[in-house]
Every structure is written in structure tokens, then in C-alpha cells.
Image (cartoon, rainbow, N blue to C red):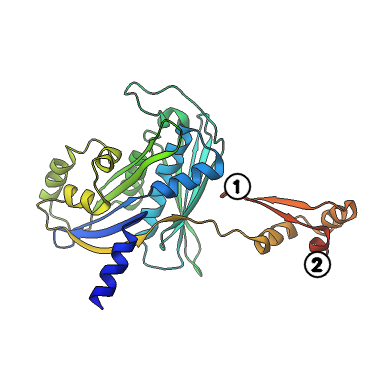
Amino acid sequence: MSDVISFADAKLRQGDHMVRGTAADGMIRAIALTARQTVQTAHANHNTSPLVSAALGRLMMGGLMMGALFKSPDELITLEVRGDGPIGGLTVTANNQGQVKGFANHPNVWLPLNEKGKLDVGSGLGQGTLTVIRDTPGVMPYSSQTELVSGEIGDDLAAHFQLSDQIPTSVGVGVLVDTDTSIRQAGGFIVQLMPGYEPFLIDELERNLADVTSVTDMLERGMSPTGILTHILRDLDYQELEVMPAEFHCGCNTERASRAMLALGEEELRDMIAKGEPAEVHCHFCGRTHLLQPEELEDLLA
């Protein structure tokens, strides 16, 4: 059985994946991921500019990692960023199975690089809010909202954990866009101190994080998610617990598109049928357009 598990893990590690682990006798929990193809799929679906690829990719990876920390297999997390910058907003939904989807209000925004020569995600989003919605079947959705700290996503997610959940957290998310606007690297990490942690761990983690320039730098140097966590949690007895897949997955289909059309009401549907033209239902998350023929609309009213 151990050989089967190792082969399965090896296959997972060949593509986009997450690694979850613990350190310091359970007082630290951590997760890291690599998600180049996941962010590339979002870029291809929405034709995002490099700036928006970075913004949306960072939030998608944050959603993936947060979703993976949940216990319920049916729980969903939605992250909504709303800002006064030209991007306008971002929406991401993820589950704890390693699936994520997302879109930007304005996907084609271009801005000059910031003073560090990096994509200026903070200016693209501007001032605004981050809303985190946790949705568990059978339970009323729980929502919390915090002000954006920098608009750079990582800082904002860390602030959410601290202010809403009172969990000291370090978050790093990064997207490196190539010269042809494709995604060269994408990855991230979340490291949290759990209730009852020893105060000295703060100093230990700050020391270890001090030489972390960026997630994409670590990925460019060939580090895997395991390597990233091993580096950040060195000398803290890091133990890997689980390897999980990561992917862009929407799940929209013609059946769901049909249910969306029912919301228009019988009168409008009959008007569309009388015109004899197919109805279009556009999915914001994946960019697909579902066509419903007049006879399919008639079936909805049967």
C-alpha cells in the first residue's frame, strides 16, 4: 500500500499541487502550492492582461489554500475583492478538493510597473475591501469583511486571518508573467500559528521568513511546495501531511445554464421562443457561452 501511495503522490507532484504540513509539535500549520497551469487557464479563459493575471492568480491561489484547510468536503469559500482601482473587483470560489474558479470585473487593465519594477497590483485594485464567505451545506453562510491593506492580495489575506480569525498568519502569493503574457510561475504559501503557540515561535518564523524575497523567486530557483515549506519551517521540525491536486475547474454546463434561464420568468422566455433565436448564457467564471435553442426553452416551460 505504501508503494501505491508514493506513486500517487509522485504523479500529483508533477503538475499543479498543494502540500499541507505541520511543525513545532502542531503549533504551526502550513500549506504551499504551485499553480502555473491553473493561473494560465484563467488567463486563457479571460484574456487577462499581465496585471490582472497577477491579481486574479494571487487571489485564486489564496482561495485554493484556504479551501484546503477546511475539514468539510462540501464546504466552499468565496473571496471577493472590491476596490476603486481600474480592475474594479475580483471574485474567486474554491473547495477543499483543490478546485478553483475566478474572474475579474475588468480583465484587460494595463498600468505602468511600480517603483520596484513589478506589476502594480495594489494600484490596479486600489482602496477597498476583502470579503470572505464560507458556505457549508445545511448551515447559513458565514461572511467576514476587512479593509484592503495594500491591494497586493498576500498582505490582505494575512490581515483577514489576523483581524477576523485572530490567527497570526504569513501569506505569500506570486505570479510571474512571461514576455508573451503567458504564466511562467505561480505559487504561494500560508503559515499559521495555532492557538496555544509558544511566543518564541514568532521570532523563529520571522527569522526564517527574512530571507524570502518572493514566492516566484523560490519557484524560479527550482523549489517545489515541499521545498518552500521545508525552507520556511527549517529548524522547526516540519512534517508533511498531505499532497493535494490543484486545478481551475468551473463545472458550468447546459443544465445549469437552463436553470439560470428560468430566473427570467415565463413571459420573457415565451418572447424569446417566439423570436426563434437561441438564447445565450455566459459564464463569468470560465468565459464559456452556452446556447439554448428555442425548443430547449420550450422544454423548460413544459
Residue at position x 42%, y 68% in the image:
73
Q: Nearer the viewer, residue 48 or 203?
A: 48
Q: Identify the residue position indicated by label 1 in the image.
A: 287
Q: Position of residue 79 (x, y in %)?
A: 46, 49
Q: Nearer the viewer, residue 115 or 227?
A: 227
Q: Position of residue 216 (x, y in %)?
A: 30, 39
- The vertical placement of 83 against 243, above or below, is above
Q: Amino acid at mark 1?
A: Gly
Q: Identify the residue position indicated by label 2 in the image.
A: 299
Q: Earlier in the sequence, mark 2 or mark 1?
A: 1
Q: Quadrant of residue 66?
A: bottom left
Q: Secondary structure at mark 2?
A: helix
Whether residue 143 sits left or right of residue 274 in the image: it is left
Whether residue 241 sits left or right of residue 132 in the image: it is left
Residue at position x 89%, y 51% in the image:
275
Residue at position x 28%, y 64% in the image:
242
| Quarter of the N terminus within the rendering | bottom left
Q: CA distance from mark 2 to mark 1?
A: 25 Å
Q: Position of residue 191 (x, y in %)?
A: 25, 51
Q: Secondary structure at mark 1?
A: loop
* The disc label shown at residue 257, or none: none
Q: Amino acid at mark 2?
A: Asp
- The vertical placement of 68 against 92, above or below, is below
Q: Nearer the viewer, residue 22 or 229?
A: 229
Q: Position of residue 100 (x, y in %)?
A: 46, 54
Whether residue 165 sits left or right of residue 127 in the image: it is left
